[in-house]
Image (cartoon, grey):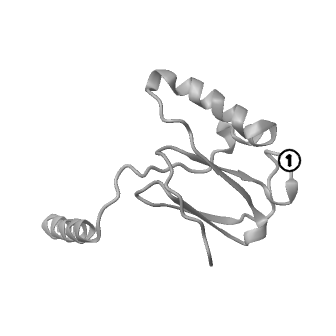
Amino acid sequence: MTTQRRKSRLGGTAVFRPAGGKRVGARAAKRSNVLIVLHSDGYAEVYAAPRDAVKVRVVNLLATDRAEEVLAEKYLDIQLGPHWSEIRVPGNLVATGSVGECRSVAAEVDRVRGVGIIRGLTR
């Protein structure tokens, strides 16, 4: 599988549209599985099974101060256009995540060992 890899700025959102062009808010009979893998450099991979059951668009939210966050959200809605903006409402939010901490392999091994030690102490 060939993918284009681009560095992106921090912050972003993935917007999903129900399969078959169904109306926003309509319940699908069967759910599709979607996995989003965020790399430490901001690159995102989106996996879906079945592939043709979802329509995905990945966009970046402008990096701003807290005070300017509302303006950045409004600018994003303008960029998205009416179709995607109608989907991007709190009731349609499925999950959230953060790339705030991305450990190296060695750091993860140390973390797992530490958890094992703590579990041993609590028994």
**SS of the residue under disc 1:** loop
Residue at position x 45%, y 26% in the image:
66
Q: What residue would you read off at disc 1?
A: 23
Image quadrant for the C terminus? Answer: bottom left
> Which residue is the extreme one toward the top?
67
The picture places residue 19, in percent across and down from the top left corner, at 81, 60
Residue at position x 48%, y 46% in the image:
9
What amino acid does circle 1 point to?
Arg
The picture places residue 45, in percent across and down from the top left corner, at 56, 63
Q: Which residue is at the front of the view, 121 or 91? A: 91
Image quadrant for the N terminus? Answer: bottom right
Position of residue 98 in the picture relative to residue 3 (left or right)? left
**On screen, residue 116 above or below 60:** below
Query: In which quadrant of the rendered view does residue 107 lie?
Result: bottom left
**How many numbered tags mark residues here?**
1
Residue at position x 47%, y 21% in the image:
67
Residue at position x 86%, y 47% in the image:
23
Disc 1: CA contacts within 10 A as few (<14), some (14-19) or many (>=20): few
Position of residue 113 in the picture relative to residue 5 (left or right)? left
Q: Which residue is at the front of the view, 43 or 19? A: 43
Position of residue 121 in the picture relative to residue 102 (left or right)? left
**On screen, residue 96 above or below 30:** above
> Which residue is the extreme one toward the left?
121
The picture places residue 100, in percent across and down from the top left corner, at 37, 49
Q: Which residue is at the front of the view, 21 or 5? A: 5
